Image: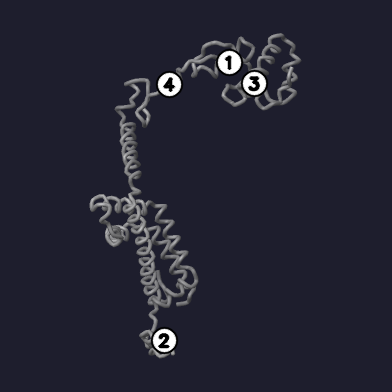
Amino acid sequence: MRNSINRPPTPVAEEDQDHQPTLQEIINIKLIESGEKERLKELLRERLIECGWRDEMKSLCRAFARKKGRNNVTVDDLVQVITPKGRASVPDSVKAELLQRIQTFLASASI
Amino acid sequence: MSVPNEDNMTSHSQLSSHFLGDLLDSIIVDVASECHRIARLGLDRNLEEEEEELRLSAQARVRVADPSNSGEANSKYVVDIFGQTHPPVANEIFECMNCGRSIMAGRFAPHLEKCMGKGRKARPKATRSSTAAQNRYSRGSPVSTYSAYSNSTSTNRLSNGTSGAAGEEYSNGTFPEP
C-alpha cells in the first residue's frame, strides 16, 4: 500500500466562513469581472502619458537611480520615490474624467 | 447642487476616489518596475545624451528669443536655433541647364522665367488646356517655336518640380512634342 493513501486529509484552507464581503470588495469584483477595471486602467494610463506625467515620474526615477547607484535600486525604492509626487501631480481634468467614469459604473451597477 | 440621496452620493464619491487611488497605485508600480528595469540594464545611457541635447536646444531657443541677438540693426542675418546664420538670398552658384550661364541659387527661379520664356521678357503664365497650347503655336512667331523646342528638352530634366513657373506648365505631360 502506498503511503500517500494513508496520509491525513488535506487541511481545509482556513476561510473565514462568516466573512461578509465589504461593499468595496463587491464593487471591485464587479469591476474586474465586467472588464471595466482594465478599461479604466488603460484610460488612466493613456491620459497620464498624454499629459507628461509618466515622463516626469520616469525622470524622477532616473535621478534617484543616478544618485543611489544603478545597481542598488529596488522597485520598492522607486515606488516610494514616485508615489507622493505621483498622486499629487495628476491633472484635475484627468482625475475628473476617471471619477466620472467610475461613478457612472457605480450607478449602472446599482449599488 | 441638491441631490435626492446625499448619502449615496458621498459614499459613491468616496468609493470612486478609492478606486481611482487603486488604479493610480497600480500604474505607479508599473512605472517604477519599468524604470527599475531600465536602471538595472543600463538602458538609460542614451537618455542622458538626449537630455543633453534637449538642454542645448533649450539654450539655443533662449538665445534666439533674446531680442538683442536677432535685432535687425545688428546684421542682416538672422540666427536660427542651431546658431547658424543664413543670408537672405541663397548665394550658391551653379550652371543653368538651359542657357549654360552661372546663376545664383536665390535668383534661379526668376532667371528661369525669363530664360525659358521668349528669351527677352518674362512670359505670361498660360493655362494647361490644349486650346491654350494651340493658341501659342498658332501665333507662329519664330521665337515661340524656339522656346517650345527648348522646353521639350528641359522639361524632362525639370519635371521634378525644381524649376520656376515656366517649367511647371509643361511638366504635367500635356505638352505635345514638336
Asked if residue A71 is positioned above or below residue B178 in the image, the reply reads below
Task: Tell me the CA gap for discs 1 and 4.
Answer: 24 Å
Q: Mark 1 vs mark 4: same chain?
A: yes
Question: Does the CB distance between marks 2 and 3 fall below 8 Å?
Answer: no
Image x and y of residue B113, in percent: 59, 17
Q: Mark 3 vs mark 4: same chain?
A: yes
Amino acid type shown at disc 2: Ser
Provide the chain ID for the residue under circle 3: B
- Viewer-side residue, B132 vs A27: A27
- The numbered mark, 1 or 4, whose residue comes first in the sequence reads 4
Q: Which residue is mark 2?
A: A4
Provide the chain ID for the residue under circle 4: B
Specify the label residue B155 is tagged with. Answer: 3
Question: Does the CB distance between marks 2 and 1 fall below 8 Å?
Answer: no
Task: Tell me the CA gap for discs 2 and 3.
Answer: 93 Å
Q: Nearer the viewer, mark 4 or mark 2?
A: 2
Provide the chain ID for the residue under circle 1: B
